[in-house]
Structures are given as C-alpha cells and as structure tokens.
Amino acid sequence: MTERPTGKVLRRGWTTGACATAATKAAWQALLTGAFPDPVIITLPGGETPGFALAAERLGDGWAEAAIVKDAGDDPDVTHQALIRSRVRRAPAGAGVVFRAGEGVGMVTRPGLPVPPGEPAINPVPRQMMRDVIAELAAAHDDPGDVEIEIGVANGAELAQRTWNPRLGIVGGLSILGTTGIVVPYSCSAWIQAIHRGVDVALAAGLRHVAGCTGATSEAAVRMLYGLPEPAMLDMGDFAGALLKYLRQHPVERLTIGGGFAKLVKLAQGQMDLHSGRSRVDRAMLAGWLAALGAGDALRRRAEQANTALEVLEMAEAAGLGLGDLVAEKAQAAAAAIVSPAEIAIDVVAVDRTGRIVGRSTGGTDGT
C-alpha cells in the first residue's frame, strides 16, 4: 500500500511484465503437466510472491496459453484491466527461450531502447523473469526448456496510441514493462521511464536538438517554431526535474523547454514537479517580478490577488511589461542549474492556452 497526501491509502498493482510472467508460468506448467495452476504464484525481483488468478486457459498440441487480467491497483494506468496473454510452444532443441510479439505487443524499430530493433517490445527485466520461470519448471520436470513465448495484449494496438510508443518507434502495440513487478499508485514511474527512453532514442538517432514540452499546445508551438522531427519531441508533462536530471547524465547539445505560462512560472520559481496538485504559483514572487519590471504598487497588489498566473500575464501585457520573457529567462536559469555541469544550450518558450507564444528566453537560442 501507499498513501497520498490526502491520507487515503492506495492499493498497489502489478506491471505488465509481472502479469506476462505469471501467464507464461501457467502456460508452461500446463504444457509440461497437462494442468494449469490457478492461482499461479511467481517470485518478483524483490522477493515478493504474489498469486494471479487465470482469466483464460487453452491447451493444444505442443502449445499452451494462459491469460491474466492486469490489476494496476489504484494507479491510473492505461493498461489497467487489460488482458495479458502468453502462448508457450515447444522450440527446436538448443533454441533456449525465444520471445515473440503477439497481437497487441509492439515491435522495436529504432535504436536507443533497452531491446534492439527487430525485437518484440518486451523489456529486459520481464524477459529475465520469464526465463527464470521457464528454467525453474524445466529443471523440476527434467526438460531442456527450449520454448517460444508469445506475449499478447487484448486491444494493445489501440491502447498504445495513448502512450509514448509510436513516438519511440515501437509499432503495433504496447511494451511489456516493469523492473520490480509492482505498480506504485501515482508514482508516475512509467511516464518518467518513457521520458528517459525518449532521450535515449533521440541520442541514438543522432539528434542534436530536442524539446521537452508540458502538453500538446506547447509542443505544437515549439515544433512549428523550430521544425523539429517527431523523435526530438519529448512529452515532458509535469516532470521537468525528471527530464533535466536525466539529461545531466545523458546530455544533448540543445534543449528547448516549452510550456504553458503558469507551469513555466513554477519552473522559474525552482519547482521541478509542475503538477497542480504538487506545486503552486507563488503570486507574491510573481508580483515582485512585475515590480522589478517597473510595475507600480497598484498593479503589484492586483497581481497578488489574481486568480491565475495567466491573469497576471494579461495585466503585464496591458501595461507593456515583458513578464513572459522574464519568466522564460528565469525558467531557463533554473533548468540550467539542474543540468549543470553538463553543457547544454537551453531556451524556453512560454505559450498561453491558445498556443500563442507569450515569452521566450535568449539563453541557448540562435536568433531563430
């Protein structure tokens, strides 16, 4: 269990990798013995031994198939309640364990991901977990353990459109993920891992300039401004800190940060998690920045009482004060401090809700 700031205790869940491993173990045991275990118990990398109920089972000539409904607990996971299927077949002698992508599981087409192009999008830890259950049962039944494992996800191709997979060059479906086997509610670990993989893919493609944006509106503005290819666009969301810290260890030559004005105010104030539930705009600080631009006491007081950061921006624009540019400059400085000592040229583009550019920093730009 985990606990949110509200005090509500939230239920943990299981990764697609854990579900695929449990389905694989059930199918392999049925192929060896003729009977499916239900529930099927697996050992996670941390030593925990959860049990999984089977949602479907089929046994054929030289193959067996089992399926498990993924339970992500209280996490808003796109694959919650998805049906994860594993079909195990006998493979030629000496083949070892071979992985295949079934319906709904993607194939890797670009370098930079944990598995190479041409392989099913099944990450290294889930692969090892499945190899372990194959080896364990093979040893118990004096079997060589030469098997082909085909993992599928019902409606996986449709679900994948709500993930980073198309942008990362994973085509045809979802990835089978997980490093611990456990989904921690609201940890956002999958999103952060996707940011990291996006950087890896961009670096492997030799891209020198990438952009991390908070949403679709800012992404469209930045992409139009610089004409960047799709692999250069990183769906940063609220996780500015996650992107910047990863870039510190895996630097690019140039980074553009694009975002809504209010979110970039938070970044300018030094906050690295831009989510509305985890950080707030400091209106007093924003009013102080207005004063530094020459705003009088009346405007500063109105800014301190404003409902939103955009309302303050509108006040500043009406008074002819360059608050948007100042916020972009301060956000650029905050980002540069995080990536240091990596030498990355950073610029910041702030937009309003319509996508209009309301502020740009000068740091890291080439005058475009």
Image (cartoon, rainbow, N blue to C red):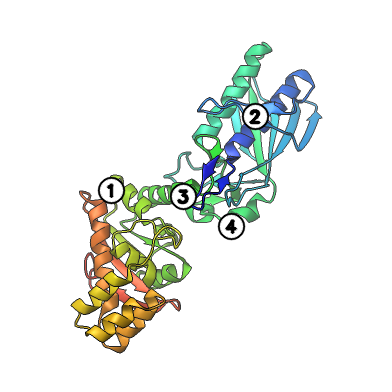
Residue 300 x, y percent position in the rendering: 27, 80
Name which residue type carries label 3: Ala
Find the distance from the CA under tag 4 to the CA under tag 1.
29 Å
Residue with the mark numbered 4: 161
Nearest to N terminus: mark 4 or mark 2: 2
Q: Is residue 324 above or below residue 183?
A: below
Residue 92 versus residue 172 in the image, above or below: above
Please name the amino acid that badge 2 sits on. Answer: Glu
Could you say whether the residue bearing mark 2 is in a helix, strand or loop? strand
Q: Quadrant of residue 223?
A: bottom left
- Kindly check if marks 3 and 4 are in contact, taking CB atoms under 8 A apart as contact: no
Residue 256, position as x, y percentages in the image: 32, 63
Q: Earlier in the sequence, mark 3 or mark 1?
A: 3
Q: Is residue 84 above or below residue 298?
A: above
Q: Secondary structure at mark 1?
A: helix
Q: Which residue is mark 3?
A: 194
* Real-space CA distance between mark 3 and mark 1, rounded to the nearest whole angstrom: 17 Å
Q: Is residue 39 left or right of residue 181?
A: right
Report, in whole angstroms, how far the alpha carbon at label 4 lies from the one at label 2. 27 Å
Q: Which residue is mark 1?
A: 248
